Every structure is written in C-alpha cells, then in structure tokens.
Image (cartoon, helix red, strand yellow):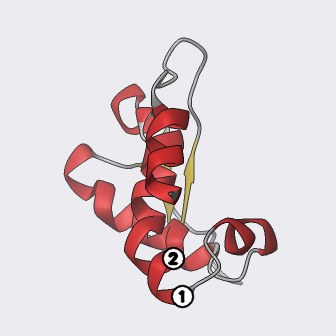
Amino acid sequence: MIDKPTVAVVPMDEKTAALNAIVAAFAADPIIRWILPKADIYLTHAANFFAQFGGPAFAAGTAFQAADYAGAALWVPPGHEDEQAEEVVAEMLT
C-alpha cells in the first residue's frame, strides 16, 4: 500500500520552495503561458506573479505543501486580499 503524502502549512521561511513548486506546476498551463509566453520571462517572473495573487496565503497560514514540496496550494481567505496585486502584475507585464 502506498502512503498518502503529508500535507503541511508552509512556514514563511519556506515560501520560496512553495512558489517554486507552483512555478513548475504551471509551466505548461495554457492561460499562464499566454500571459507569460516566453520561457525566460516566465521563469524570471512567474514566482513573483503567483506571489502577488496568492502571497497573502502565507501570512494567513493557508499556504500548503504536500510531500516535501512535490506540490503546493495557496488559498487567500476573505479579508486577506492584496488590493495592489493587480496593479503590480500589470506593471510586471509591461
């Protein structure tokens, strides 16, 4: 029988590992790659892109990782949104 992966809250000092797992997971996602189509641009900016929208999950304790960062998920609970995220991403994409 295969053991189920362990899921844990991501501590703030491991934020980069979680964001890297998300960058790897979305590397072939059609919508994200439409927004960031060039590989060098994607690899340079994707972690910051995901941090802008999902970053508040780390402070809220709702960023999770599974199986030692084989995967990660960010959930931003109501009231924790970053109001400036859209502006920052718009600047990043220009």
Q: Position of residue 14 (x, y in %)?
A: 26, 57
Position above or below: 31 against 30: above
- Residue 8 visible, this angle: no
Horizontally, residue 5 falls left or right of residue 82, namely right
Q: Residue furthest bottom?
A: 39
Which residue carries the number 2 mark?
42
Residue occupying image coordinates x 71% and y 83%: 28
- Residue 94 visible, this angle: yes
Residue occupying image coordinates x 78% and y 66%: 31
Q: Amino acid under label 2?
A: Tyr
Horizontally, residue 76 falls left or right of residue 26, namely left
Task: From the viewer's side, name the closer residue of 46 and 2.
Answer: 46
Q: Are marks 1 and 2 in contact (CB under 8 Å)?
A: yes
Q: Which disc is residue 39 wearing?
A: 1
Give the spatial CA distance, label 1 vs label 2.
5 Å
Q: Residue furthest front?
A: 94
Position above or below: 71 against 64: below
